Amino acid sequence: MKTALITGVTGQDGSFLAELLLEKGYDVHGTIRRSSVDYRERIAHIEGHPRFHLHYADLGDSMSIMQVVSQVRPDEIYNLAAQSHVQVSFDSPEFTADIDATGVLRVLEAVRLCGLKDTCRIYQASTSELYGKVEEVPQNENTPFHPYSPYAVAKQYGFWIVKEYREAYGMYCCSGILFNHESERRGETFVTRKITLAAARIAQGKQDKLYLGNLSSLRDWGYAKDYVECMWLILQQPVAEDYVIATGEQHSVREFCELAFRNVGIELRWEGEEAEEKGIDVATGKVLIEVSPDFYRPTDVVNLWGDPTKARAKLGWNPQKTSFAELVKIMTDADMAKVAVERAGESVRTNLAEYLEKGIVK
Ligand code: NAP
Ligand code: G4F
């Protein structure tokens, strides 16, 4: 039986990866952080599994990382923990650098200092944000990086320090350069989930309007459940290498809105341009989407489009397993169900016990 350690197990990807590794028979250890309210919604259903174990550790705290690595002595580490919100990285740049850059170094050093450098494989959660102000489309493993936010600059350090430890110490460590991947478990302030939740609430008369930033931004959006499979595949290869993981298809935020609202029975038309653009319900003429400059970023990455050729060829991975339309449907269906039992003024999260009981959250 292999032992894996997942940092960031409470996150979207961490929770799907934990499920996948448990299915594969791994002993799975995850790190969690202490907070005054324990929201462990995404892993609640696997807590108590005999092969699932949680440890307190923070990527800003070397001693806690050393302690968990020396205790668990994992065969594989998936370093998913991060301050993962690009817009937040402009408000908390130092914290983002500490966790998303130096935090990666702390994990690598813990492995080395615990004497595991020849036995423990490490996956680093890298990102398409490294391409930033893109220098070519679509982007592949050879496209030059041009990070364009404090988040991306920190993640670029993570990418290079992993490469450095691979070359300097012969460690099996590699980065998955993952393009945006979403799901019904996506954080509620990322644009896709913000849209599917709002579409569900508007359709059920629980919200009037949705405010968004740059509607023209283009992303290559995949399904998170498919992407965690790649994380595992990347660590099973004979030689440690970095991979781009993407669908190879690009859509705008505007298109995502159209599809999500259509799924809940609302057809949208657009009027106006840039900050004056509005999404209008064709049936009623009501303005449902407006642009708010609050959601503009000081520098925004607007043209991400990945080329998954290497992942398809070497990992045998199917980038089109879940189509864009299927992804939006999975997310809108899940939010329609959650919003249906949401009480006025409460977040969907506060009803967790009830959702678990009714099987709405599994
Ligand atoms: P997420 O839902 O935001 O999860 C982030 C995880 O990191 C959470 O478990 C969080 O714990 C944990 N974390 C944050 N700060 C920490 C700290 N100081 N110490 C320890 N743990 C900490 O992110 P995700 O979407 O699953 O993404 C997983 C990873 O992939 C991240 O590194 C992200 O940057 C990267 N990535 C994501 C995408 C994407 O489209 N989803 C694409 C490329 C790369 P709490 O629950 O306690 O906050
Ligand atoms: O959903 P987003 O916040 O995701 P973003 O910035 O692409 O970052 C995500 O994907 C990265 C991979 O490329 C990860 F590394 C990162 O951890 C994270 O998971 O924004 C997507 C786009 C942006 O261009 C943003 O400006 O949508 C635009 N947008 C328009 N209105 C908005 C909004 N983004 C957010 N969050 N909220 C809005 O109201």
Image (cartoon, rainbow, N blue to C red):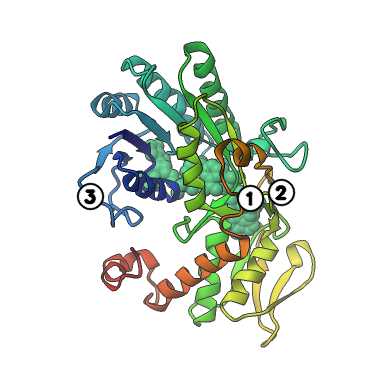
Mark 1 CB within 8 Å of ligand 1 = no
Quadrant the N terminus occupies: top left
Residue that label 1 marks = 247
Name the quadrant containing residue 236. top left
- How far apart are the alpha carbons under marks 3 and 2? 42 Å
Residue 244 screen position, x and y as percent: 61, 38
Q: Nearer the viewer, residue 133 or 329?
A: 329
Q: Eyeballing the image, is 209 above or below 180?
A: below
Q: Eyeballing the image, is 262 above or below 314?
A: below
Residue 235 screen position, x and y as percent: 46, 32
Residue type at numbered disc 1: Thr
Mark 2 CB within 8 Å of ligand 2 = yes
Quadrant the C terminus occupies: bottom left
Circles 3 and 2: CB distance less than 8 Å?
no
Q: Is residue 158 left or right of residue 40?
A: right
Please name which of the two marks, 3 or 2, marks the residue nearer to the observer: 3
Please name which of the two marks, 1 or 2, marks the residue nearer to the observer: 1
Q: Nearer the viewer, residue 339 or 329?
A: 329
Q: Tag 2's secondary structure? A: loop
Mark 3 CB within 8 Å of ligand 1 = no
Residue 309 screen position, x and y as percent: 67, 40
Please report whichever mark, 3 or 1, sits nearer to the chain's N-terminal start. 3
Residue type at numbered disc 2: Val
Q: Nearer the viewer, residue 41 or 300?
A: 41
Q: Which mark is residue 49?
A: 3
Residue that label 2 marks = 302
Q: How many marks?
A: 3
Residue type at numbered disc 3: His
Farthest residue toward the bottom?
284
